[in-house]
Image: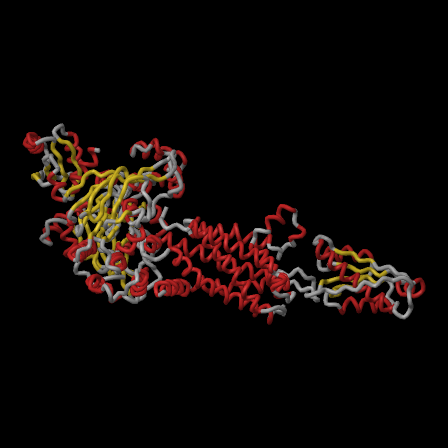
Amino acid sequence: MKQFLSFVKKEFFHIFRDKRTLFILLGMPIAQIIIFGFALTNEVKNAKIAILDHSKDASTASLITEIESSRYFEIAESLHSDADIQTAFHKGIVKMVMVLPSNFGNNLKHFNKAQVQLIADASDPNVANQLVNYASAIIRDYQKRITNNRQLPYTINTEIRMLYNPQMKGSYNFVPGVMAMVLLLVCTMMTAITIVKEKETGTMEILLVSPVKPMRIVIAKAIPYLLLSTINIFTILLLSVFVLEVPINGSLILLLAVSILFILVSLSLGLLISAGADTQQTAMFISLIALFLPTVMLSGFMFPIENMPTPLRVVSNIVPAKWYYNIVKTVMIKGLGVTAIWKELLILSGMLMFFLSLAIKKFKIRLA
Amino acid sequence: MSEQKAITTNKLTKKFGDFTAVDEISFEVNKGEIFGFLGANGAGKTTAMRMLCGLSLPTSGEATVAGLNVYKENEKIKRSIGYMSQKFSLYDDLTVKENMRFYGGIYGKSNAFIKQKTAYILDHLHLEKEANVLVKSLPLGWKQKLAFSVAVFHAPEIVFLDEPTGGVDPVTRREFWNMIYVAAAGGTTVFVTTHYMDEAEYCDRVSIMVDGRIDALDTPIRLKEKFNAASMDEVFLKLARKAARAAD
Amino acid sequence: MSSISVKNIIKSYGKKKDKVIALNDISFEVKEGEIFGIIGPDGAGKTSLFRILTTLLLADSGTAIVDGLDVIKEFEKIRKRVGYMPGRFSLYQDLTVKENLDFFATIFNTSIEENYSLIKDIYLQIEPFKDRRAGKLSGGMKQKLALSCALIHRPVVLFLDEPTTGVDAVSRKEFWEMLKGLKAQGITILVSTPYMDEAMLCDNVALLQKGKVLSINTPAGVITDFKYPLMAVKAKGMLPLLEQLKAMETVKDAYPFGEYHHVVIKNEQLVQQVRDTLSNSSLSDLQMKRVEADIEDCFIDLMKEK
């Protein structure tokens, strides 16, 4: 036991004396949360639009106020003629133009029917789509309000409720994703690198020729990273609750427990990589290409898995981060308990057993 | 007069903080001379050599290499010297020919020159068959001989050799020194460090550094007379044992 | 009883096409409590041999016994009983001298105090720097620290792979003094070196070249095995002199050797003839004398013979 403790102590020395790496390890989750939270958001907020109002009556004025008061739009320009529309788009500032034809108020009052034209810049189709949807919704609301006093026959009112994320915040999606990514980077890449480093500098030779059980060397190496990752989880959770206002709806204990399970899976993957790599460079490349990329692409946090072609959907099942991502979403955002994630838990445990036994089998008690 | 000298230094000093690595060394190396630069680990050899190669600026003192000032003309110095060390010299993952092509290119030699010189070296070292072999698969002795050929590829005035023969077998070691002799006979000045004391005997003159200073500088014969020693090994031990600087 | 016994060890690397034979049928015995030197240049196979004996590498064929234990079957027992200092500097550069020693002591289930008597002489020299990071030590100091770490558990057999490579002549002398001290404490030492002069400090040596044993003998025995008369010659203009010597019919081999050239003469009868030829040629400041062969002369001779 003393042997083992002195090993762990040594690993901590390595980590604390390499200040730069330590800084990166602890700073990474903060940087990622900030980047994803504020820079890479795919929500539409305060999009600049222009209004071309031919009618200029009370109805158009109140509709324009509705639009302006929503948090999605900001009216950047008031246009005066159809020719202005082209110019407005050419300047590249406005993303959408709303055209209200003449006699809008009159038509609405006397014929119960009026036209609104929405012209959107579809060079970014996703944004255009969202803008048009938001605008339509506002117009529908407006229409509903003014027709409230008069009963129209056969109207179906759709009522939409966004569950778990009523404000449709993107951060609900990426906080679990960042957790998966950071844990994978810290645990897998760093364990692989520190083990391979001992091979490179030749200290592994001496360790192997000592009576230490090889598996102990490896477990001792994993412990500091387990600790660091736990710190990282707390950083991410604190930032997401207090800065991004993403609440933890489920049990914190359960969330931590499954995170530790995922950390163990990541550590065993790191171990597996270290068995096959001979230089720190190789270890890093394998970790990045074989693990980091699939995590970003195939875990579902960047691109929805449901929209992928079948082969990719099948492949995504072997990406551990996909399951972890699902678990975190279920527990943290939906606030559900173990019964909702038993399948994912089972799969992750299976992966842990598989990777760990493979890594132990491949771990060399000799040099070649 | 100074045109006759390949290297001159006058109170050349290098300090790192309050540690004086090289302490006011003054010496001259003649053109075409084989100059042995000895000293224990940590005596300041590497630091001194770096200053002479234009890789590091002196703290004070003067030095010229091939008539060029180490402060102002270090870029020119790099063009007129060759350098080879035990640790790094050739790219392991390039072939013999590619290495020569590369170094020729670095010194801005014409394709015709590189081609002709490469053929000459391969013929001379009997490496024609290995021309397209990766350097890493050559035995160490061959590698070192090849590295030396590459270091003098651009016909430099002075070649700096940092422990060129470490770990090389005794036969190849002698072949290597033969190449040094030939280069020196052709007018190239050779500045060499070594841990093999018998190799110190092959030099025209030898300097021995202790604690950042040059404690002895003369021909091997006169050094042995002066220190009443049978071999350079003994001379070295007598001098280096005095070192106060145990570790740095 | 033999402390190390190596029989017909063969080790090769790579696939069929570009196969490199690192060790080609090596056999030798090391007696208990002796210093046995493996003398050979880089690429002779020294490191492969050390790794096989320290259970880090499996040989293609052949057997090796260390301290009565088989290197393949009983590798775990061997790992408890041997000390190993690999060729490269293999300590933790970012740990201090003291931390390195403490660490290696605990992984061998011992403490610095327990075997202090063994490492005392060596450790006292590095003790003033005990709080310095190992990466900041000079070559000689690193080597002393590595040796202390290899000795911390009082091993029965000590394997030192090129401990003096790249180390200056003074530190090398000191290092060999330390080895003598360890031998006096009953530790068997297998040491490899590319420096031929260090062979004289061993009890027995094996000269190794390109994976083959050239000779196994006591250092004195290696020298008596050198059957040719040897002369040291010098004159003004050493390079032309060497050419002249090499061209002589009576001369088997000639090469630079310190301040002289060594001349290996084909047989005893021809010695006078060589003397006469040289005296009669127009060499100025000619000096020549009969000399005893050095281990390096023997190595050169054996290398060229094979």
Q: Residue at x 86, y 66 (%)?
A: A56
Is A54 above or below relative to C210?
Answer: below
* Residue C102 rendering spot, x and y as whole percentages: 30, 64
Name the image quarter holding residue A177.
bottom right
Outermost bottom residue: A242
Quadrant housing the N terminus of chain A = bottom left
* Residue B173 rendering spot, x and y as whole percentages: 23, 41
Q: Residue at x 32, y 54 (%)?
A: A206
Q: Is residue A81 left or right of residue B34?
A: right
User: What colouring method underlies this structural image?
Assistant: secondary structure
Outermost top residue: C249
Q: Residue at x 34, y 45 (%)?
A: B89
Front-most of A305 and A47? A305
Front-most of C183 and A185? C183
Is B145 above or below relative to A27?
Answer: above
* Residue C44 rendering spot, x and y as whole percentages: 27, 41
* Residue C270 rendering spot, x and y as whole percentages: 7, 30
Total marks in image: 0
Q: Is residue C224 left or right of residue C190?
A: left
Name the image quarter holding residue A327.
bottom right
Is B132 above or below relative to A275?
Answer: above
Front-most of B196 and C41? C41
Q: Is residue A300 left or right of residue B197?
A: right
